[in-house]
Image: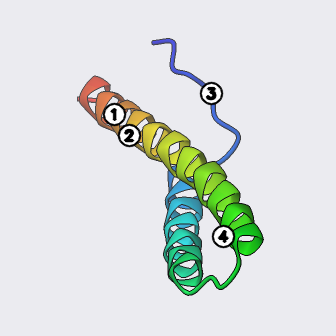
Amino acid sequence: MNYQQFEKTLPEYEKDLKEAKKKFDKLSKQYKKCRSAYQAEMIYDDLTILNEDISELQMIVKELRQQKKLVELDSY
């Protein structure tokens, strides 16, 4: 079988995803407390980038989990 190669293992990507979600939650709270438009804009930009990173990590984790299931099925 030809599986897509990733730079990290599934647990490493899961850890990265968890950390990105925590950082997103923290920035979201900061965004709600912003006092200036400039600060809000800067945090919003960071939130947008983090959201894209989270989406990408979710797709990678999903793909790796599917590959892991296929490998387990192939081994039977």
Q: Are marks 2 and 3 in contact (CB under 8 Å)?
A: no
Q: Judge depth for marks 3 and 4 and give the one in front.
A: 4
Q: In the rendered structure, which amino acid carries the disc numbered 4? A: Ala
Question: Which of the labelled discs sits on residue 62, or is there none?
Answer: 2
Q: Is residue 32 left or right of residue 38?
A: left
Residue at x 68%, y 55% (from the top left corner): 45
Q: Secondary structure at mark 3?
A: loop
Per the image, the residue denoted by label 4 is 40
Q: Of marks 2 and 3, which one's residue comes earlier in the chain?
A: 3
- Residue 12: x and y in percent read 59, 59
Q: CA distance from mark 3 to mark 1?
A: 13 Å
Q: CA distance from mark 3 to mark 4?
A: 38 Å
Q: Secondary structure at mark 1?
A: helix
Q: Residues within 10 Å of mark 1 (few under 14, many from 20)?
A: few
Q: Of marks 4 and 2, which one's residue comes earlier in the chain?
A: 4
Q: Are marks 3 and 4 in contact (CB under 8 Å)?
A: no
Q: Judge depth for marks 4 and 2 and give the one in front.
A: 4
Question: Which of the labelled discs sits on residue 66, or is there none?
Answer: 1
Per the image, the residue denoted by label 3 is 5
- Residue 65 vertical placement versus 40 (above, below): above
Q: Residues within 10 Å of mark 4 (few under 14, many from 20)?
A: some
Q: Secondary structure at mark 2?
A: helix
Q: Of marks 3 and 1, which one's residue comes earlier in the chain?
A: 3
Q: Of marks 4 and 1, which one's residue comes earlier in the chain?
A: 4
Q: In the rendered structure, which amino acid carries the disc numbered 1? A: Gln
Q: Judge depth for marks 2 and 3 and give the one in front.
A: 2
Q: CA distance from mark 1 to mark 2?
A: 6 Å
Answer with the quarter of the image where residue 41 lies: bottom right
